Amino acid sequence: MPQRLLYILLLFIPIVGWLALFGYAVRLVNEFIEGRYEGLIKLDFMEDLKLGFMVFLKALPFYIGYMIILSAAMYINETLGSIINLVLGFFVIPMLAVNFFRKQTVESFFEFDVLNVVRDNLGEYIITILKQYALVIVFAVLSIVLVGIPAMFFTNSIFVANMYGRLVEKKTGSGL
């Protein structure tokens, strides 16, 4: 497992390394959704690069729309823009991103009905996000000894992925 932490070194290879890591992170999130995670999965550079590239392209419409909404809100009022960014970043984007990582379609980033899980399980969702932030803090401290950098990168959405797998996939009975 320690050698798999070296995958983070791909960050130093612009674009190609980043896309490979992105594809790897998508596969890792899906392991958590399916409840199959037992340790870091093995990087398949070419497959993860292809997956990362395709997922990146499919995510562009959502992020372009997000930036337009955020820019318009910031233009109207900087405080309003900051509040919208905070609300979207905390309550909307994590669950939509995990849904997108799972289904990997452009439309899945716009399936706002998945946010009903957040509304219906608000307390659990807030605890899930707070655990995720706590994990980032722990890994930030571990970054002093370099272990935290790859851990922080690869575990970004694990708690939301776990919640998604339990509350969305089991509820709908879908297994992609």
Image: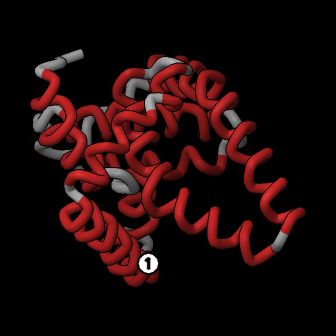
Locate the C terminus by quadrant.
top left
In the picture of the structure, the residue carrying the numbered disc 1 is 140
The quadrant holding residue 156 is: bottom left
The answer to whether residue 5 is visible is no
- Is disc 1 surrounded by few (<14), some (14 to 19) or many (20+) residues within 10 Å? some
Q: Residue at x 53, y 51 (%)?
A: 9
On the image, the x and y values in percent for residue 141 come to: 40, 84
> How was this image coloured?
secondary structure
Pick whichever, 63 or 149, lies toward us.
Answer: 63
Q: Residue at x 86, y 65 (%)?
A: 76
Q: Is residue 33 left or right of residue 63?
A: left
Q: Residue at x 21, y 35 (%)?
A: 168
Q: Please, is residue 153 above or below residue 78 in the view?
A: above
Q: Please, is residue 127 above or below residue 150 in the view?
A: below
The answer to whether residue 40 is visible is yes
The quadrant holding residue 121 is: bottom left
Q: Residue at x 63, y 71 (%)?
A: 83
Three-letter code for the amino acid on which mark 1 is drawn: Ala
Instruction: Identify the element where label 1 is drawn.
Output: helix
Q: Is residue 46 left or right of residue 79?
A: left
Q: Is residue 164 left or right of residue 101?
A: left
On the image, the x and y values in percent for residue 75 come to: 89, 63
On the image, the x and y values in percent for residue 158 come to: 28, 51
Pick whichever, 19 or 73, lies toward us.
Answer: 73
On the image, the x and y values in percent for residue 131 come to: 26, 71
